[in-house]
Image (cartoon, rainbow, N blue to C red):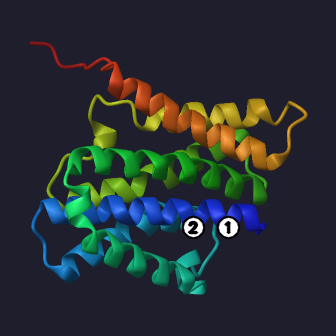
Amino acid sequence: MSNFFQIIDILGTIAFAISGVLVALHKRMDVFGVLIIAFVTAVGGGTLRDIIIGQTPVFWLVNMNYMYIIIISTVVAITFRKKLDYLRTSLFLFDTIGIGLYTVIGVEKGLSVGLHPLSCIALGTMSACFGGVIRDILCNEIPVIFRKEIYATACILGGLSYFLLRQLPLENNFVFVIAGAIVITVRLIAVKFNISLPSLYKD
């Protein structure tokens, strides 16, 4: 794993851990509860990804740095929780950064084991979304991915752009950054302008 890829992975872990902390604090959980929610949010998607592609033991059992990163992120987020008073905005921001980074990580993992591009996009989307699904279920919320919001769709578009960008004479690191930024940008625009998928429910 390249140093750049490791940095992206670490940033994604931090972003998701903090988003988990913010949800747990909003639910008034104790310290242990906050840590557990931060942990499952940060590694849930990556765990599913590794199990699907047969890479076991999963990444966070092999590399203890992920445990340390999650614990440190949790302590920092709790310590500065008063600076994060606008929980909705903060949660949205960190969650959006997390799905952007984890989408490209999942796509790259799929490529590393020789999966078809469509399978890589699906793997990237699951990597990005599943930690948030576990977080929301444990916190008794309807997962964001099952609501009308543009969430998984942003990941899919980012995955597609990743493969389109690979056709251009660009450094792989730039492809990572641009594809991740597309996921983040699509989600930001969708929320800003209230763009959502059509609902099947009719009044």
Q: Nearer the viewer, residue 118 or 20?
A: 20
Residue drawn 25% across and 60% down? 83
Left or right: 180 with respect to 88? right
Q: Which mark is residue 22?
A: none
Coordinates of residue 54 in the picture (x, y in percent): 63, 69
Residue drawn 24% across and 19% down? 200
**Quarter of the image with the C terminus in it:** top left
Left or right: 181 with respect to 71? right
Q: Secondary structure at mark 2?
A: helix
Residue 179 can be seen, yes or no: yes
When the figure is inspected, residue 100 is found, relative to residue 48, above or below; the finding is: above
Dot 2 corresponds to which residue? 10
Residue 138 can be seen, yes or no: no
Left or right: 45 with respect to 112? left
Coordinates of residue 20 in the picture (x, y in percent): 30, 63
Q: Which mark is residue 6?
A: 1
Q: Are marks 1 and 2 in contact (CB under 8 Å)?
A: yes
Give the residue type at disc 1: Gln
Coordinates of residue 167 in the picture (x, y in percent): 85, 31
When the figure is inspected, residue 107 is found, relative to residue 30, above or below; the finding is: above
How busy is the neighbourhood of tag 2: few (under 14 within 10 Å), some, or many (20 plus)? some
The answer to which image quadrant residue 19 occupies is bottom left
Residue drawn 23% across and 73% down? 34
Q: Secondary structure at mark 1?
A: helix
**Quarter of the image with the N terminus in it:** bottom right
When the figure is inspected, residue 59 is found, relative to residue 114, above or below; the finding is: below
Give the residue type at disc 2: Ile
